Amino acid sequence: MRRLSAVILGRPRMVLAMSSVALLVSGALGAGVIDRLSSGGFEVEGSPSGRAIRHLEDRFGTGEVDLVLLVSVRDGRGVDDRVVSEAGHALTAQLAGEAGVEEAYSYWSTGLAPLRGERGDKALVLARLEGSRDEITRRLEALIPRYEGSTGPLDVRASGYGAVYREVSRQIERDLRRAEMVVVPVTGLLLLFVFRSAVAAALPLAVGALAMVGTLLVLRVVTAFTEISVFALNMTMAMSLGLGIDYSLFIVTRYREELALGHPPPAAVRRTLETAGRTVVYSAITVAASLVALLVFPLPFLRSFGIAGIAIVTIAGAASVLTLPALLTVLGSRIDRWSVRPVRAPVPGRGGWHRLAMTVMRRPLPVATVATALLVLLGLPFLRMELGMPDPRVLPPGAPAREVVDDFTRNFSGGEAFPVFVLLRGGTPPPPGEVDAYATSLSSVPGVARVDTWTGSYTQGARIFSDPAFGSGFVRGHDLYLRVVAAPSVQPFSPRGEQLVQDIRSTPSPSSDGVEVAGQAAAFVDAKRTLFDRLPIALAIIAAATMLVLFLAFGSLLVPVKAVVLNLLSLTATFGAMVWVFQDGHLSGLLGFTPREAVDLFNPILMFAIAFGISMDYEVFLLSRIREEYDRTGDNQLAVATGLERTGRLVTAAAMLLAVVFLAQVSSGISIIKMFGLGLALAILVDAFVVRATLVPAFMRIAGGLNWWLPAGLRRVHDRFGFRETGGPAEHAVGEAEAATPLAAAGATDGSETR
């Protein structure tokens, strides 16, 4: 940091010029990234269900439906009317002839009763498109406008998961524009209140802008190699601005402290980089380590957030120790120009945060007990969390694609658009009698409306239809498949859909090699299994990386363990609240979403990684000042009180500003984004006001000198590889004295610690 400060102080305008060029180039090249982002990314790469669906597409020319046309008949006619039937046949044939449409069929082309509405005035046309999820979405952009509307006696509306993904992408674009229009001015006003100077308040926006456009450029480059989810854009905006605020607040406040001590601006910049600058680097490493864990999951959705998050943290951290100090060097004492109220230096040993710390440390055990009990109570709903995946109900009520799905769910007898496929391959096809018995068993599984296969159609344990011409399409050489149509009440991405797949897989089959199950419900089961298999690895990465960074930064065994445990406790409370709101449906009317009896499978993992990293961000800020004071005084209680006094206002101000940024996501029309924004805002506020303000000082008071104790072997490791925010001779001497007498320091836990 000394060498870096020398470069910045020597050529501050050159650093600013390079930062400006980077901002303009990143903005120009990264602006079109949204056109390259994916609206999917929820499928596990190489999963059993994925392999099975590809085999069905290649071998049988069938698979999952991408487009559903809900056809309503006008003028009181029924779908079997001659004129209506002719129009229905023509519509089906026209869709089947479109470029990129692999398969299209309807009630009129197949005669399947489940494709006919229960009142006889509606029917379905289903189509499967070729290409990847993004290619399908682009095809739908052209197809849907051509087919929606009135055609002769028919009114046509479009939906299906392909159409839903298309509408989700459009909604996210609208949400981002609206959020930017609200968040930037509101945040600017709050920054003016916190920084108390128009010049200082503009600095976090500059750092946030660099992080945002830089991340867009990174995502634009990465899309050339892998799939990136459009949902990552919401985090890019929120975290870029949030971390820009966090890091700028910490550095600007330290710079003001150094000016108040009488240092000229160049010396104040150098001291700020050597102290707060190092802390920002530690913090960025800790947050990035938490986000690296998202890369272990083979789902593009989670991986996208990991890539975007790491880019945001890296760029925000770099801008905070390069661009921001250069700005401070050029501004000098003009940092407080256009003040809205005087900027007063804090009085040591006084203020609300100092009094709070001393109050907590006078009764640390009761305070810790009450705060822990509160977090546990908030976390109890987490024990009954059900997991699901995004379905059309993530769209707001009234969204066209969702209205169509709701309509055919109410008016059609089966889930024709979202079947489960059961594939038997290898060897020779089982005899017809065994296939008949197997299909009969599957049709008796709870939640199954119908089974179609080589030997006919089945429902409720009986064959209801048999036609050799119909059944021939289910056999190709040695391969055979069955199509299982679920009851309308069984949503694919739900606990009931998961149970259906498990029941199908556990039903004895005539194949000695077992069966392969495909379809959206099976994809959900595979995704859930994969996430649970990889979750221990991700948690181990987060815990190990966090503890290693905190050990190297602060030279302690107990402090890293305490930080991880308290963060887990805080996040459990947040997840409990998410279950209460989004799974149970409380506040659904106020927040404007439809409860789905489950929490989205990916959101808890995503929120855990991001919230854990941000919590550690604040932990590093607090501990750095506590350690600095402890190195200076050797007094644990005084160090904790002074550290909280110096950082309490910063952490709470940063938390409130970041919470405002995330709360803006609650205005989104997509329920996934609502949960993401509300959950992270709540996690940040709980961490700042409960954990940092009460639990951290309480536990550090109870531990006393053990906070900074290390065995001799680890002390040598830290002396060689560790890093400190301050490192002058006096501090080093105090640290050596403390290390030499760990048990004596640990025993000094009464009031005699305070000098």
Image: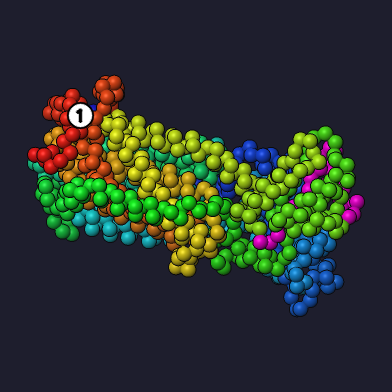
Q: Which residue is mark 1?
A: 743
**Rendered residue at 35%/57% (across/down):** 660
Residue 195 or residue 369, whichever sits in front: 369
Snapshot quadrant of residue 77: bottom right
Q: How many marks?
A: 1
Q: Position of residue 438 (x, y in %)?
A: 81, 47
Instruction: Answer whether residue 471 is magenta in the image.
Output: yes
Q: Position of residue 491 (x, y in %)?
A: 64, 57
Way the structure is coloured:
rainbow
Q: Position of residue 399 (x, y in %)?
A: 57, 65
- Locate the N terminus and report the quarter of the image it occupies: top left
**Rendered residue at 29%/36% (across/down):** 559
Mark 1 residue element: helix
Tell me the magenta residue range: 466-489
Residue 76 or residue 148, whichever sits in front: 76
Q: In the displayed structure, does residue 327 sit left or right of residue 606?
A: left
Q: Position of residue 607 (x, y in %)?
A: 44, 48
Instruction: Answer whether residue 49 is magenta in the image.
Output: no
Residue 13 or residue 125, whichever sits in front: 125
Q: Residue furthest bottom?
A: 75
Snapshot quadrant of residue 707: top left
Disc 1 residue type? Leu
**Rendered residue at 72%/70% (across/down):** 72
Snapshot quadrant of residue 620: top left
Q: In the displayed structure, does residue 242 sit left or right of residue 169?
A: left
What crowding class fits label 1: few (fewer than 14 Cα within 10 Å), some (14-19), or many (20 or more)? few
Q: Is residue 225 visible?
A: yes
- Locate the C terminus and report the quarter of the image it occupies: top left
Q: In the displayed structure, does residue 516 sit left or right of residue 6?
A: right
Residue 111 or residue 695, whichever sits in front: 695
